[in-house]
Amino acid sequence: MPFNSVGFLCFLFAVMACYFVAPPRLRWIVLLIASAAFYLTWRPAYGIVLAIPVVVDWTVARRMDRCPDGLSRKRWLWVSLAVNLGMLFVFKYYNLLAFSFHDLANHFNWPLQVYKVDLGLPLGISFFTFQSLGYVLDVYRRDQKPERSLARYGLFLAFFPQVTSGPIGRAESLLPQHERPHRFDYDNVKNGLLLMLWGFFKKLVIADRLGIYVNQVYDHPGDHHGWTIVLATYFFAYQIYCDFSGYTDIARGCAQIFGYDLMENFRRPYAAGSIREFWQRWHISLTTWFRDYLFFGLGGSRKGRLHGYWNVLVVFLVCGLWHGANWTFVLWGAVHGILTVASIATAEFRKRLVALTGLARLPRVHQLVKLAITFHLVLFAWVLFRANSFGDLAVLARNLLDFKASRIIFNGGLDISQIILAVFCIVVLEALQAFRSRIPVRTWIATRPIWFRWAIYQGALFTILLFSADSQAVQFIYFQF
Amino acid sequence: MRVIVAKTFVFLFLFKLLDISLFLALLPLDQRTVVQQGASNEGDLGPLYRGGMREDMVAFGDSRIRYQLDAGILKQTTGLSTYNFAWEATPFDQQFFTLEEYLDRNRRPRAVIFEADPLSLDPAFFKFQTLWFRPYAGYSARVADRIFTSVTEKYANRFVRCLAFRGRVLPILRSAFSSRPVSGNSPAGTVPILRGHPPRGLKLDFKSFHINEARKQGFRQLAELAAKNGFVLFLISTPEYRHDQRLNARDADAAYHFFESLAKAYKTTFYLNYARDARFINQDDLWFDAQHLNRDGMVPFSRIVGADIAARFGDGTNKILTR
């Protein structure tokens, strides 16, 4: 039941009705049942995969809390790590590694037989595994008290707005929310629905429309050249942003209706002035997870500058691998790692360069230059992310430079008027986001007269209904991760 | 609570009011769009659903028919008015579906050109593109059945009428207010094939394909449809750039033999095989890419096909042509 389906809207309104009819102290049980039903609609067997970290990590955390010494706590931590990462390995990475070794062995004529594990990829496995691991690590560090109720812990992992693609919640902020009785709050419901509407606009009107063009180009890289690939890459940057941030807005809006506050996942990432800043604005819940549990776990930058750089590289390699079982993702992570290290290492040099060129006296121009450079570096990395394989990447790299044989626009289900509409929507998106960074749009709308507010609501609804891309429900990109 | 319920009802009432108003405003424009879309002969299905087309010959296929056979040139060489419905990456089942839709609404053609690419026999290659048919779901029960596969979508379209125009408002407005003439065919040579040559050293697709029994049965049904409806069916295999590079020769031969056997079995079916036509396959200057002739190749190829069709039209003795 994807968010961008009528089925989900019916489900949401049914859950809302049950939730607000139930007594406040029992409302979390309604959410638990709804979350279980929501997850089981994808494929009932995967319910077991979700149940394993729920039971194991809940038990581990409680046992860990009772351990008198650090060593036995560590043993329990290893149990949790083995179960969670083992599950991720079996479902997500086994085939990649097995067949990579197989190819390597073939290359050297070594006899090696590998077997394919065809279990499919349980939805949201990377998200709920990391969320659960974060909880166990918090309990291990004594930053978090273990949850007493197994059912509440189940809701913490399976909460339906976030189970499929995050944001990866933290126990310290989410668990207390599950314990608190939530009363009906008109403003929460209204603001939640508005946030969902904004998410649907990003997903259905922008991302799905751009996706038609991007898929045509990146799925048939041999057929396209020069400007077509360039345009498709620009489009992909906004497709993935609108797709994922649209999902996050729908998830956050959905949670807000029930009185929950999920963490913000995006803050205008393409307005970043450096790669380092980009990662402070992009997929914040994952970035902060890696920072708090992996980067600091490896020692951060405490053991010297070089060691710090090495840790950054490791974090980005793992981040790349987290995104998918394909070496192109690892390469994407490596490139971001190198760019981040370069961004940190050259900070002083760049400062001097800015002073030398006189850009320091023109702060707006300087900001614009930084923004453009960062955006294009990110864009370059998106090519690696979107390419289906290294073979496709090679074809794209070769065809990208071939500007003679290309026309910029082709009719791959997206004619010129649709492209203009997509570009216009991107401009509206960026303008609204820039406006929001000064004045919260929802607060601003709330202060207008009722006729104006309702015109905005109805207008937004009809814009989505009429201008959403004409394709059947397209899966969110991050669902595959 | 009462205020919230009251507000919700008023909001929903206004929503429905706007929905109906927009539907009523867009419907006549949409009908006009459906009529006009075929003006450029770029594979648009508009004229088909307008009904009353009186073409002598219609062509179905994927990009290899769309870009390599020019309806205008075919008309010049055969004397038969021609409309080309071919569209990129169209699989056999979609072509057949389009033909059935055509026959339901328009005058029976005298001849039908159908692509006989070996890959047409393997359903793994292209998928039915429901996207192209979406605009016509309101005009054809068969299309609605094919496109609205989910129960929710069927109901959503019923309750929120505006959804019928989802994603099509711009084309509707553009076509409704433009003054493009309604015509069946564009002049010869205006099919938008690009000029260019195949990139040197391009690695072609060596993927082997598997001839599917259901697809073979589909082609038999097509031949039967031709016999039943009394039109002549021309199955055409278009030239293959450096033939054996794209296709596994053995598999390709099996496919060609199948098409030949079909032409032998049905009186009204002809098979024209240009896959290894020496006038095209090794002439780099005639190709845009590894699968499509460029303008310099398309024009002579359309003339040759037109001449071959004209020579065979009404002649049941010379049914198989292999170049």
Image: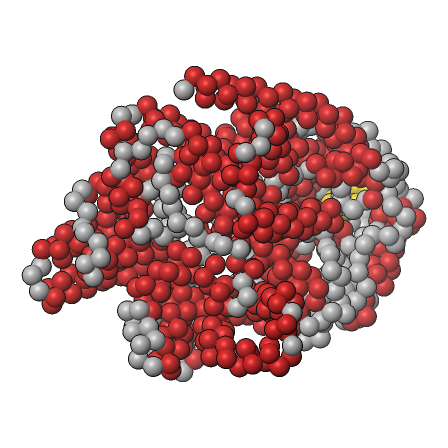
Q: Residue at x 85, y 63 (%)?
A: B296
- Relative to A210, say whether B16 is above or below: above
Q: Is residue B315 visible?
A: no
Q: Which of the 4 image quadrants contains residue A114? A: bottom left
Quadrant of the snapshot with the C terminus of chain B: bottom right
Q: Residue at x 30, y 80 (%)?
A: A303
**Residue A277, percent across and down?**
49, 65
**Residue B249, percent across and down?**
63, 65
Q: Which of the 4 image quadrants contains residue B52? A: top right
**Residue A84, percent across and down?**
26, 58
**Residue A221, percent across and down?**
62, 63
- Answer left or right for A54 relative to B231: left
Quadrant of the snapshot with the N terminus of chain B: top left
Specify the farthest residue to the front. A361
Q: Residue at x 62, y 81 (%)?
A: A356
Q: Residue at x 39, y 49 (%)?
A: A263
Q: Is residue A239 visible?
A: yes
